[in-house]
Image (tube, rainbow, N blue to C red):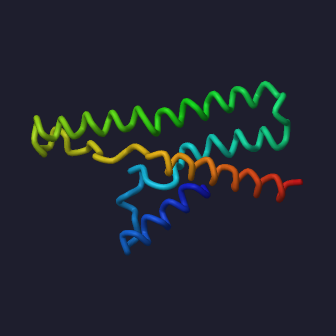
Amino acid sequence: MLGGSLKFCINSIKSRNLAFDQIGLGNFPSTHISIVSSITWLVYFREGYSDPLLGVCLALLIIVTIDALDTRKKIEDIVRVLRVELGDGKSIEGLRDKTGHNPIDAIGGVGVGFLAALIIVFTTT
């Protein structure tokens, strides 16, 4: 919730309007990475680096990060090609032009996850 709320506020300030139309369009910070990194940080803070669950969390964080940085960018490329080939007709109306993240968005997601984990650790112990 912290990552999504922060992103909504940043997008609203940038567009000078409530940014409901930008939900799900990438940008800073990556909400998906925020969610997975907060769980990873929580496991690290509570269980330490030798817990096998941390390895599972790190693997999931890597998969989500690869998706955000690479797979989604390729989807954006495909949408651009479809728009050129098919035009802007109804057949491609629901496709988003922006879905991926850049490295700063990803790093921001890890930072927001870290902050969320710290808040949870210090408010529940």
Q: Quadrant of residue 5?
A: bottom right
Q: Report the residue at 70% width, 41% height from top.
A: 39
**Residue 32, image x, y percentages:** 54, 44
**Residue 73, image x, y percentages:** 36, 38
Q: Report the residue at 81% width, 33% height from top.
A: 49
The residue sitting at the front extreme is 103
Residue 73 horizontal side relative to residue 90, left or right:
right
Q: Is residue 50 above or below residue 65?
A: above
Decide which of 53, 111 is in the foreground and name it: 111
- Give the position of the C terminus as an image quadrant: bottom right
Residue 11 horizontal side relative to residue 115, left or right:
left
Q: Report the residue at 35% width, 60% height from top.
A: 21
Q: Quadrant of residue 84?
A: top left
- Give the position of the N terminus as an image quadrant: bottom right
Q: Report the residue at 61% width, 45% height from top.
A: 35
**Residue 74, image x, y percentages:** 33, 33
Residue 88 horizontal side relative to residue 21, left or right:
left
**Residue 75, image x, y percentages:** 32, 35
Q: Is residue 28 above or below residue 9?
A: above
Q: Quadrant of residue 53?
A: top right
Decide which of 64, 105 is in the foreground and name it: 105
Q: How many marks?
A: 0
The residue sitting at the bottom extreme is 16
